[in-house]
Image (tube, coloured by chain):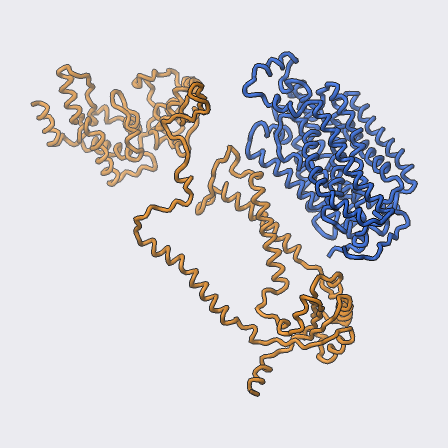
Amino acid sequence: MTEKQNQETADQKLVGLLAQFEDPGSLVRACNEARESGYNKIDAYSPFPVHGIDPALGIPRTILPFFVLIIGLTGCAVGLGMQYYANAGDWSPLFPGYNFMISGKPFFSLPANIPVTFEIVILSSAIATFLGMWALNRLPRLANPLHRISRFKRVTNDKFFLLIETKDPQFKREETESQLSQWGASVVEEVNEDLTDQQLPSWLQLAGLMTALILLIPPVLIFRAEGMTSRKPRLHVVPDMDWQEKYKTQTLAPNLGDEQHPNFLFVDGRAMQEPIPGTIARGDLYTDSEYFRGIKSGTESFATISTAGVHTGLQDAAHQDDSHQDEAAKDKPAEPAKDDPAAAPEPDWVTQFPANVHVNQALLERGQRRFNIYCSVCHGYAGNGDGLVNARAMALAASGQAQWTAAKSLNDPETKKNPVGRIFDTISNGRGTMGPYKSQIPVEDRWAIVAYVRALQGTGIKPTTMTKAVEKAVAE
Amino acid sequence: MHEVQPAKITSPIVSLKDNYLRLIPISLIVAAAGIGGALLFSGFNMQRFSFAYLTGFCCLMSLCLGGLFFVIVMHLTRAGWSVTVRRIAEIIAMCTLPMFILYLPILIPLMAGSDEVYVWNQPGWSIHGDAAEKQAVLDASKYPPPIEELKSYYLNRWFFAGRMVTYFAIWGAMAWFFLSNSLKQDKTGDKNLTAKMQKHSTWMMILFAATLVFSSIDFEMSLAPFWFSTMWPVYFFSGGVLSALAAITLICLWLQRSGRVTDEITVEHYHDLGKLMFSFVIFWGYIAFSQFMLIWYANIPEETFWFAWRINPAPDGVMTGWQWFSLLLLFGHLLIPLLALMARTVRRSKNFLVYAAIYLLVMHWVDHYWIVMPQYSDIISDHVGPAAGLAMHFKPLIDIPCAIGMAGVFVALFCLIARDRPLVPLKDPRLGEALAHHNP
């Protein structure tokens, strides 16, 4: 029993003297007395705000407004910076921003960013006020020794209290007590702090542990789901984005009138409209002329772009827009007829492979496979112009059943002189009776075929047994 | 109600006393000289003068309506702090009724068929050309009905005049209700009068809002009859209340410096008025920007043209110069006063508040100049063509005397209504609360 008593007193520590007052006036007077006597570690407690208590306690004006102002201005800068980064930050290599064109406005246009900036200023100021108030009041506290005093409970009802802390340099146990009584305190009481209060309660520790365990569940579930298959259809979080109400290509535009007086949303009645002449879809602007057209960059005119261009929309635009034709006519002294490509003056073809085409074994093998799929049917596996289709067509032409121009042998001395750019262009857009292949063969595969054709021309492979077999078959 | 000691008025003079007899002629001379000077400098160009006059009128009108709002809202919220400054607001609110006479120079030509100011006052007002041609265009485009035909159901001179009479009658009645009951209380000290005003302030606030919405559309928005802005009345309101608060502050300071109402209005009241001015600076900016941003973002031609004319350096190829006024408003009406009025010490400084209140009143005039005058340059640019630049419409010799004249009108009206009446509600039951008012 005595041991326990000793234990308790060992854990107790005097933190101050609490004086009770019966009305706000005597509290303010006592505060003034205490301040004038040189106390500065004092605090008053009251059921309601008491006018003039701040100067009576000698509390300086709070620095919170300046703190909030600084945080608010920081929020302003962060809000603007965030939007600048997200909307116009394409310079960032690691996480570039989204350069979305929205109703023709600049990527970074200030009016659109003001509401978000404003909200962030308000939010950061409010949080700064709240947290700043806590910090300046040294909150949160797990336990306040005042709550151990039963008398203090009436501070929320009808009593007024003044606390003088032991930390105060003026504090002297007996002298302070007599001073407080002298200033009109009805009761003066010791405030003792139980040091065990400062330890985290065991239930709080348990709750923290439980929270941490519960927070582990979602990542565990995600980890588990990653290695599993599911037969259930996927979840549609935003169904109206997954199944949009929209009019599809090749359908009628919505009719705003009735059947007798149709009034389609678009004049031509089609749901999908063609792009405006001269516009280029995102990602379709092929500026690298050497790579995409096989023409030396800087030398191509609009006409050569349009004839050698890989984008049909661009080509159509050139056909429709006469002004561009006139410009092209200025560039070229003699405007060639569209139907007669042979008469067209040759563009400045590239003679070397473009910088981003790396001619190596892998590319040649790729080119061989593509060549065998697309080209060999006419030009033959060795490029001698003796493919199966050509052989059959020649036979039909010989018997007068068809018109046919013989497929070129790629090993002709004249054909061998063609620069690689011209070969690329031939594959892309066709030449003579040969049709264009740009819609079937991607650009990098076309360059692979060009590389393979060069290899064929260089090695001069003789007709293989395959072609001989074909010849034999044709002859029969 | 908390029983307080009968509040004691300690100031020796709580009214204008005999000074109003001297002030009224002086302010009337200023008014006549200012407005007459404007007319003279305009070379009796009635259209140009009318626009300058309308600028000053709308500036003052919104100020008086702001005063009326202040009175109603103080009763509605049972405010105790504002009792000592409420009488000044009551007098400002009472100015709304005589303001009708000041609107007659605009209204009478309108009724006589003039479309110089309000271009909608002609059939087929949107189409240039002679009347027959306008009518022909109107007849030809029956389906869908042109917007001017739909709007002409609202914007026609008889309905317009009828609305004007209604607005001023309602405002005058409401202002007189508050002023007369408050004056009656000065004599009787009857607390029931406060309860009565508080009770009726409820539906009066709704009526005030309704009349303010339509009147603001009629006064200024209908200068550009094609324009749509649902934010407009709030914009008009926010500037009006801000200017009313500035005027109340200025009048309080003037009264105290001239030795009247010395002890009743304390630094705490100035602090609260300063707080309200600060908040209405933000509110004005919030509303002005909301109006602008929604129109800017939606980018619909029938809405954007109004701002395009004021913000683009050369709308329709005309170097109007209005973009400088737009920038002046952004900085002068929002950002500068926002920062200047932010600190507590500043709002408690009488010396500073004098300048702040005068500055805000000047900015209020710039705001209305920016609203009204570009419509004039729009009209003349149709006649003059792209040459109609800033020099064509910006004539300070017309506009500034007119503004000073309107200030004179305001002082004259204030003195006429105040006379030797007490400038503080002497026996208001909350007077004690106001006198003991203390900002934490």
In the rendered image, the residue lying farthest to the top is B132
Can you see residue A113? yes
What is the display colour for chain A?
A: orange
Can you see residue A35? no
Q: Nearer the viewer, residue A474 or B122?
A: B122
In the rendered image, the residue lying farthest to the left is A476
Instruction: Please indicate whether residue A133 sits to the left or right of residue A204 in the image.
Output: right
Instruction: Please indicate whether residue B400 sits to the left or right of residue A352 in the image.
Output: right
Residue B155 percent location from the top left of the image: 67, 24
> In the rendered image, which quarter contains the N terminus of chain B?
bottom right
> In the rendered image, which quarter contains the C terminus of chain B?
bottom right
Q: Nearer the viewer, residue A73 or B226?
A: B226
Q: Residue at x 30, y 25 (%)?
A: A429
Count of numbered badges drawn on the protein: 0
Q: Tell me which corner region of the image, top left, top right, bottom left or bottom right, holds residue B220.
A: top right
Residue A86 percent location from the top left of the image: 49, 44
Chain for colour blue: B
Instruction: Please indicate whether residue A357 sits to the left or right of residue A375 in the image.
Output: right
Residue B397 percent location from the top left of the image: 78, 28
In the rendered image, the residue lying farthest to the bottom is A2
Residue A22 percent location from the top left of the image: 75, 70
Q: Nearer the viewer, residue B407 or B99?
A: B99
Q: Residue at x 70, y 20 (%)?
A: B115
Q: Residue at x 56, y 48 (%)?
A: A78
Q: Tell me which corner region of the image, top left, top right, bottom left or bottom right, holds residue A341.
A: top left
Examine the rendered structure and indicate whether residue B138 appears above or below residue B265: above
